[in-house]
Image: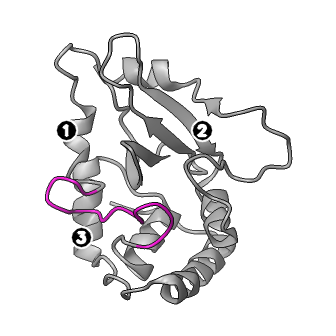
């Protein structure tokens, strides 16, 4: 399914990330995802993985490296990035959609928070999903964690990325940036 190509800069980033991941892995890296696994993931997800994301999984390791609890494996008994995706895009019991199509959960920060990549955006907008407490007035919140997957990954290697440390940007941030496209993206799920 994947016909998108990485740029030279993304090729370089994957090489540098591979070195960084190998150097920072305490128990070694998982094997990379096979071509068949990547194809199955894209078929189940319904979209091609962004070339940079495909490089992470197919050339470095099928999850387990990076900040937080590490990159989520593509398939892992219902909790993988892709095999857990169909349940995410279904409506909750109240009939309200809660996870937009085309947004792949790629990293668990803990406390129910996830980093996710919008695979419908060419640059791979990275979002943070922060769940509500289950109370009617406590809504789920989606923040922009990084404007690009490449920038987010660069910040991994710089040690600046975390659930409360948005990517370093040239402009000052007054706080987390809410994802303003959420409402329209959820409307298209139902």
Is the N terminus in the top left, top right, bottom left or bottom right quadrant?
bottom left
Where is residue 188? Give x, y as percent: 37, 22
Q: Main secondary structure of the magenta part?
A: loop
Q: Real-space Cα distance between discs 2 and 3?
A: 29 Å
Q: Real-space Cα distance between discs 1 and 2?
A: 23 Å
Where is residue 80? Give x, y as percent: 25, 57
Where is residue 2? Give x, y as percent: 38, 62
Q: Residue at x 64, y 72 (%)?
A: 157
Residues in magenta, as a range: 65-80
Residue at numbered disc 1: 87
Mark 2: give few (<14), some (14-19) or many (20+) Cα within 10 Å: many
Q: Is residue 24 above or below residue 112?
A: below
Is the C terminus in the top left, top right, bottom left or bottom right quadrant?
top left
Number of marks present in the image shown: 3
Q: Is residue 133 above or below residue 69?
A: above
Residue at numbered disc 2: 144
Where is residue 174? Give x, y as percent: 78, 32
Q: Is residue 170 above or below residue 65?
A: above
Foreground: disc 1 or disc 3: 1
Q: Nearer the viewer, residue 6 or 21?
A: 21
Side of 141 relative to 79 (left or right): right
Q: Nearer the viewer, residue 178 or 56?
A: 178
Residue at numbered disc 3: 37
Q: Residue at x 24, y 54 (%)?
A: 43
Q: Quadrant of residue 74?
A: bottom left
Q: Secondary structure at mark 3?
A: helix
Question: Upstream in the sequence, badge 2 or badge 3?
Answer: 3
Question: Upstream in the sequence, badge 1 or badge 2?
Answer: 1
Question: Upstream in the sequence, badge 1 or badge 3?
Answer: 3
Foreground: disc 2 or disc 3: 2
Q: Secondary structure at mark 1?
A: helix
């Amino acid at each position: 399914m994947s016909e998108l190509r990485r740029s030279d800069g993304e090729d370089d980033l994957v090489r540098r990330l591979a070195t960084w991941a190998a150097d920072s892995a305490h128990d070694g890296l998982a094997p990379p995802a096979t071509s068949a696994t990547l194809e199955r993931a894209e078929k189940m997800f319904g979209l091609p993985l962004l070339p940079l994301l495909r490089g992470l999984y197919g050339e470095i390791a099928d999850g387990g490296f990076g900040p937080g609890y590490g990159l989520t494996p593509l398939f892992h008994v219902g909790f993988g990035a892709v095999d857990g995706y169909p349940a995410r895009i279904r409506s909750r019991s109240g009939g309200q959609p809660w996870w937009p199509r085309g947004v792949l959960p790629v990293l668990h920060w803990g406390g129910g928070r996830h980093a996710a990549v919008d695979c419908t955006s060419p640059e791979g907008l990275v979002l943070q999903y922060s769940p509500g407490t289950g109370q009617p007035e406590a809504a789920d919140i989606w923040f922009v964690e990084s404007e690009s997957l490449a920038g987010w990954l660069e910040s991994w290697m710089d040690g600046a990325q975390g659930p409360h440390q948005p990517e370093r940007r040239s402009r000052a941030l007054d706080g987390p940036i809410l994802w303003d496209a959420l409402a329209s993206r959820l409307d298209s799920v139902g």
